[in-house]
Amino acid sequence: MLHDTGFAPGEDPLLPGPWLALEEEAEIPRLALAEGTLDARSAYQAVHDELMLDGNPRLNLATFVTTWMEPEARQLFDECLDKNLIDKDEYPRTAELERRCVNILANLWHADPENAIGCSTTGSSEACMLGGLALERRWRARRRSVDGEARGRRPNLVFGSNVQVVWEKFCRYWDVEARAVPVGDGVTHLHPDRAAGACDEHTIGVVAILGSTFDGSYEPVAKICAALDRLQDERGLDVPVHVDAASGGFIAPFLDRDLVWDFQLPRVQSINTSGHKYGLVYPGVGWAIWRDREALPEELVFRVDYLGGDMPTFSLNFSRPGAQVVAQYYQFVRLGRRGYERLHAVSRDTAMWLAERIGELRPFELLSGGSDLPVFAFRLREEIDEYTVYDVSRALRAEGWLVPAYAMPEGMEDVSVLRVVVRSGFSRDLGAIFLDSLGRAVRELESRGGDHKRDVAFHH
């Protein structure tokens, strides 16, 4: 309880720094609402002070999500937080910017912008769900045309065991059999022949990952499509492909222009990406693009008029702020092809340089080197048994660095790794500081050993 000092809130010279001007007997609510109110400044200070215990985003090498935007982008972001993106009749210009972003991405991924269709989503996970739903409904339509009925037949979806957890969610939520093909035998991602071998007449599609969250590597989308072409020639099974380009969709078009992975491949029907990853926008915005209207079944499109005007919608969410879409368009206008290329090239160069330096350290060997996504994974050499990657992760956390440690997916479960994600703004100078911290962590663990305990599972 604070007593009357005779000074206005925040002016008591005996109390250094910000302090809370609480009413007598007032308490900060934790699990239930307080009976009374609190002035705005005190409420802000209470929440602000608690958030100071969060980690430093610049030292978070676990997340793929953008942690910095220019002041001008932030200003636009703030100006559009109260605009409801779904209300296209009230905010037609915001709707127009979303349409332009869809066309820009369709063009970037070699679709015909006149025929392609797409939308923004709440992160790439919603975009994956929409892509999966379109595959499932198209499969049902195909089955009806073959035997007149798809009911009673459980569809399946084929992907590598290295996929992000959203694909397991999709299969569970919509009662689709998840055919997760194990990795291993020299590859850390989906093998083309194994993908084709897992398909049958009930397969709704194959998911190819352009940039694995486990080690940053691209899956060979063109080879997967070629294997499915052979499957169609041999068995008559026409299996479509969805490309989960959550991260790679904003990397490959600028740094790997000769790589064929997108709508240049006729078998690719839909692609998703995260604008809030290497699209360089604050969370959370994703994008889903279909090759043409035939790839998105009309039954998934709803039309509403109770906000004014006739508005088609095919997203899972309804009301959400337009800020992220506006920020995405700002980045497209601001950076263009050369800007994205320059920023991502610096990130990839930094990732490859840092991976090479870590690979030179005695305890470590690389699983990937940052040459696809600016992401790499490394593990302890087999002869190191005094401590584990989980001990290294904990030691780095003590210096403020967040570097996840986890086991690789089915097929490589016995391999545990550390992973570093290099984002825009992570310089070589900061990388050198990280190397110093990693060196100190190793020396400390070599002198005292680790506790060999595994952290709570890091789920992708």
Image (tube, grey):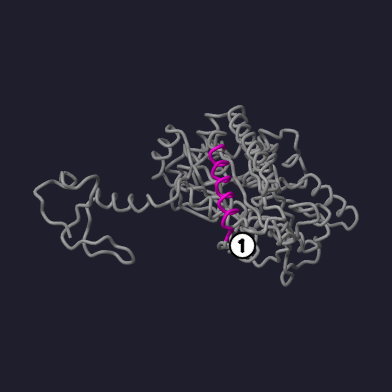
Q: Which residues are magenta?
A: 432-450
The residue at the far top in this view is 338
**Residue 141 seen in render:** no
Relative depth, front residue between 447 and 138: 447
Residue 441 part of the magenta-drawn span: yes
Most common SS among magenta residues: helix
Q: Is residue 298 left or right of residue 184?
A: left
Q: Amino acid at mark 1?
A: Lys
Left or right of 347? Residue 156 is: right
Indicate the secondary structure of the residue bearing disc 1: helix
The reply to whether residue 372 is in sight is: yes
Residue position marked by numbered label 1 in the rendering: 169
Magenta segment includes 7 = no
The crowding category of the residue bearing disc 1, from other C-alpha atoms within 10 Å (few below 14, some 14 to 19, many at least 20), is some
| Residue 111, image x, y percentages | 69, 38
Residue found 53% across the figure and 34% down from its top: 331
Residue at the image point whose x is 53% and y is 50% from the top: 396
Which is nearer the eye, 171 or 11?
11
Total marks in image: 1
Q: x, y (%) of residue 140?
A: 72, 62
Front one among 249 and 154: 249
Q: Which image quadrant is residue 337 in?
A: top right
The C terminus lies in quadrant: bottom right
In the rendered image, the vertical position of residue 21 relative to residue 372, given as above or below = below
